[in-house]
Image (cartoon, rainbow, N blue to C red):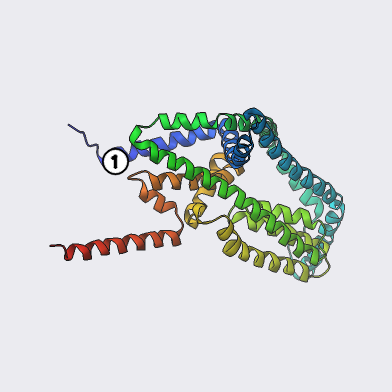
Amino acid sequence: MKIKFPFYFRLAILLLTVVLIVIIMREAKSILVPLLISGLLAILISPLTAWLEKIKMPKALAVGISVISLIALLSALVYFFYNQILRFSGDLALLEARVTYYLNILNEYIETNLDGVVPVSAENIQNAVFQYLYENAAGLTQGVIATAGTLTMVFIMPIYIFLFLYFRRFLIDFILLSFEEKHKLKVRNVISKVKLVVQNYITGMFLVICILMVLNSAALLSLGIKHAFLFAGFAAILNVIPFLGPFIGATLPILYAFLTKDSLWYPFAVFLAFYFIQLFESNLFTPKIVGGKVSMNPLMTIIALFVGNFIWGLAGMILFIPGMAILKVIFDEVEGMEAYGFLLGDLRSARKKSNTKTIREQLREVKGRFKV
């Protein structure tokens, strides 16, 4: 006899399970984050490895060349931004002088028009900053430790990527053996779709970043903004984080234009340029290049960002978007989980799917009426 538990008991078990999963994910961040990033990157470059193996190259050599190519590309990006940041650091004295200049103008306005208001001084700001550093020394120490952990992760990730690629068929066979024979075809289909989704997402986002880099650089260079490539690249990469990333990426060049230019036209022009570029990105580039297979509705995207930030910080904000896209593929294929796939999906595709299903049901009903 099957025992049916009351609703409140099942809800309590579900909430307890969610809490345990979140605790485990937070405590195992140093293990899970490099594994997941390595897995996504391994899936990304697996076509290159497969092509090298197809031309009769030894498996270990093909995997090694693929990993080295990926490392070379990422190293070139890091070197580019490192040089740009070094050039930007030479303007820090100028920025400090401009901040002091604007503070003096603000203080003159306060003394002239606002009685009883204490003027703002650069020295007070510096004291406030040092006081903040003193009070949060423990947190900063943890940040240094986290940076050391990040360096360790950078060195161990190429090993993970190599092993994922080398044993990729072994891992797929293990997953297939974990299911009954009648489910293996569907599982293989899910694996193929997940691989396609990850490759579409990462390659699509990389292409979108390159396009935004070119457009942002052209806009900033045309306005005469120094360090255009640094601001353009930074804004393009931040675009990976939906909603929040583009806002932060546009704020920095606007603020820099305000501090270094004598006319308010320049920060306003930077705002307009980034606004129109972002319109093209959200309505044209990302839908056409990344495709609808990884698109999710804004509500689920925002929830994914907040949950990812709560669990893993910045890494979680980046990883949870493709992670939810993978979950959507799995939910769509697993019987009884279609509703969750519908919840994660894009609103337009969801309506289209819902309308198609309704038409089929109507056709069945019409057919049934004429059935003798």
Q: Is the residue marked by circle 1 packed among few (<14), some (14-19), or many (20+) residues within 10 Å?
A: few
Relative to 347, 127 lies left or right: right
Relative to 366, 315 lies left or right: right
Residue 369 percent coordinates (x, y): 17, 65
Relative to 100, 148 lies left or right: left
Question: Residue at image x 29%, y 37%?
Answer: 9
Q: How many marks?
A: 1
Q: Is residue 286 visible?
A: yes
Question: Residue at image x 62%, y 33%?
Answer: 161
**188 to 167, vertically: above or below:** below
Tell which of 92 and 217 is nearer to you: 217
Quadrant of the rendered structure where residue 28 is? Answer: top right
Residue 212 percent coordinates (x, y): 68, 58
Quadrant of the rendered structure where residue 290 is? Answer: bottom right
Instruction: Kindly identify which residue carries mark 1.
Output: 8
- Which quarter of the rendered picture does the C terminus lie within? bottom left
Residue 171 percent coordinates (x, y): 50, 30
Tell which of 181 and 87 is nearer to you: 181
**158 to 229, vertically: above or below:** above
In the displayed image of the protein, which residue is found farthest to the left? 372
Question: Residue at image x 36%, y 60%?
Answer: 354
| Callout 1 secondary element | helix
Quadrant of the rendered structure where residue 59 is? Answer: top right
